[in-house]
Amino acid sequence: MHQVGAGVLGPVYRTCESDGDRLVALKAFHLDFTPEQAQTFVSELENVVGSGKSHPALVPALGAGLSDLVPYLALEYVVAESLDVAIQRDTPAPVEMVLPLAMQLANALDTAHAGKLVHGALHPRDIFVAPELAKVTGFGVVPALEHAGLRGPLRRPYTSPEQISGGEWGTAADRFAFAAILYELLTGRRSVGTAKQVIAG
């Protein structure tokens, strides 16, 4: 097992399935869970397992469980660069380059939302840019956290206003994050400030 990343919720490891035939990304959640919260969280994650198979741009979850009270989620391993790396290197990007990616991501979001699957913390780090197709990971994690009584991460400027204020949120939060990501791709700047300030640059 080799650590390949780390986020606000915990580290990500690359490993193989027990038969050794397929690489898997293993996300460990090092949060302050009570035993009951950890079990509830894993139960909710198990409902996500298999999701994403209906669209090639959605990274499917393969399994979930507990190890020494640390919840984990196994996902298909994606060999591709994350969008946050591309943003740092290649922005501002021309519209003709952003449009195909935007269409892929919009279709992926529509498919996920139609299947009652929401992300809730969409960030460029959750998007992998492969030559043929972009892939999005992380759907279902934040709703599972909230169902277990924990709050999802706030990832400004991608987190929607209703989430920041602690209000009810839904699929519109993912669309807000999607718009913030597109703005950053096209301008090379993060959308910080009021709407008028963002438009004025």
Image (spheres, grey):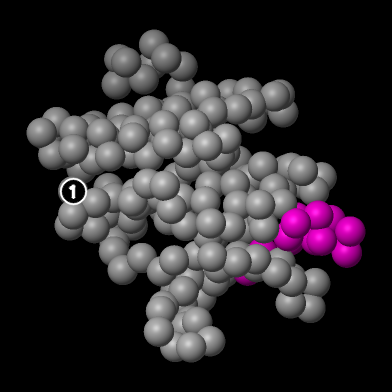
Horizontal side of 68 relative to 122 (left or right) equals: right
Instruction: Give the image location of residue 176, x and y in percent.
Output: 46, 27
Image position, residue 127 (x, y; %) = 37, 50
Which of the 4 image quarters holds residue 101?
Answer: top left
User: Compared to 124, does 5 lie above or below?
Assistant: below
Q: Image check: 124 left or right of 118?
A: left
Of 31 and 197, nearer the camera is 31
* Residue 37 colored in magenta in the image: yes
99 or 188, nearer to the observer: 99
Residue at x 49%, y 31% (from the top left corner):
114
- From the viewer's perspective, tell me whether residue 94 is left or right of residue 170: left
Can you give x and y, in whole percent of width and height, for residue 192 in the image?
A: 43, 28
Please tell me which residue lies in front, 90 or 163.
163
Is label 1 in a helix, a strand or a loop?
helix
In the image, residue 142 above or below residue 106:
below
Can residue 36 be spotted in the picture?
yes
**What amino acid type should be assigned to the residue bearing mark 1?**
Asp
| Occupied quadrant, residue 77 | bottom left
**Which corner quadrant holds the C terminus?**
top left
Would residue 42 be counted in the magenta stretch?
Answer: yes
The vertical placement of 72 against 134, above or below, is below
What is the magenta range? 28-43
Q: Is residue 181 visible?
A: no
The residue to which callout 1 is attached is 90
| Depth check, front residue: 50 or 100 | 50
